[in-house]
Image: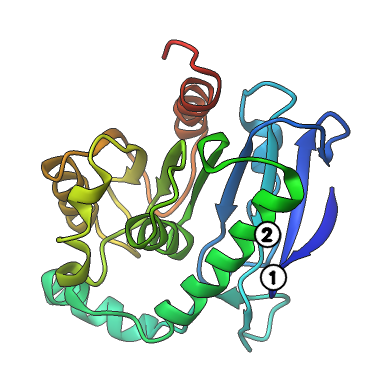
Amino acid sequence: MQEERFGSLKARLTGGLDREGGGAGPVVLLMHGFGAPGDDLVSLWRLLDVPSETRFVFPEAPLELNFGFGDSRAWWMLDMERMARERALGHWRELIQEVPKGLQPVRERVVEAVTQIMQTLHVTPEQMIIGGFSQGAILACDMALRTDFPFAGLILMSGTMVAQDEWLPLIPNRKEFAVFQSHGTDDPILSWETAIHLRDTLRNGGLDVQWVEFRGGHEIPLPVLEQESLFIRHQLYHEAE
């Protein structure tokens, strides 16, 4: 693994011929969730069963959180107590309407970073999958909808919808775009209902969503990684799923 800076974001590179992002293989970019350390998802590259030339980029969120236990980061600030309270009251429809404060500026930073990644690693958008877990998945989805990069696919692990009124008119522009979406039926952070709503909304807009559900919480279990590996192989190497 090596650390690089793309635009204003720090990132870890793994995979490839030298296991540090070397070579000319396609790229999978994954963004971690709220409150996680910057290297939270790096270990996934060893668990995903994909060709060895596949390169992975793991950007680090720019905001440092003062939780008092090690490195904790965020793409934008969240009021976790309010989210839990609203969910307990069944107000998830109100939550998905909100446009998170800080989403636009951090999206612009990620777009800048992705543009530099493509230049530095010599890959086209068609040779790149973007995605993430939880808050990172939301950010990846927002970026995919608000840009015209023809990415090879989008990975949404335990994500949800936000800014619904802004996303809805953008979704048809990504017709037939390939999406891998996973979610736990007992997720205590981002509810099952909102994940289903996101899935159905994307499908109704013409996107090709591969849905993987599992009995569990806010996590990434091995069965998800097995299906995700097949998705990556199909989208980047055109192998049959």
Q: Nearer the viewer, residue 45 or 8?
A: 8
Badge 1 marks a residue whose secondary structure is: loop
Along the horizontal axis of the image, is 130 left or right of 174?
Answer: right
Q: Residue at x 51, y 70 (%)?
A: 34
Q: Residue at x 54, y 26 (%)?
A: 236
Q: CA distance from mark 1 to mark 2?
A: 7 Å
Is residue 72 positioned above or below 151 on the image? below
Q: Nearer the viewer, residue 81 or 45?
A: 45
- Give percent across and percent down for residue 45: 68, 38
Along the horizontal axis of the image, is 106 left or right of 143?
Answer: right
- Give percent across and percent down for residue 222: 52, 32
The coloring applied to the image is rainbow
Badge 2 marks a residue whose secondary structure is: helix
Q: Nearer the viewer, residue 142 or 30?
A: 142
Q: Residue at x 84, y 28 (%)?
A: 17
Query: Mark 2 highlights which residue?
Result: 116
Q: Quick one: label 2, few (<14), some, or many (20+) residues within 10 Å?
A: some
Q: Quadrant of residue 24?
A: top right
Q: How many marks?
A: 2
Q: Amino acid at mark 2?
A: Gln
Q: Nearer the viewer, residue 193 or 14?
A: 14
Q: Amino acid at mark 1?
A: Gly
Q: Residue at x 70, y 52 (%)?
A: 119
Q: Quadrant of residue 9?
A: bottom right
N-terminal-most mark, 1 or 2: 1
- Give percent across and percent down for residue 74: 55, 76
Q: Which mark is residue 7?
A: 1
Q: Which mark is residue 60?
A: none
Along the horizontal axis of the image, is 114 left or right of 143?
Answer: right
- Name the quadrant of the C terminus: top left
- Give percent across and percent down for residue 21: 79, 41
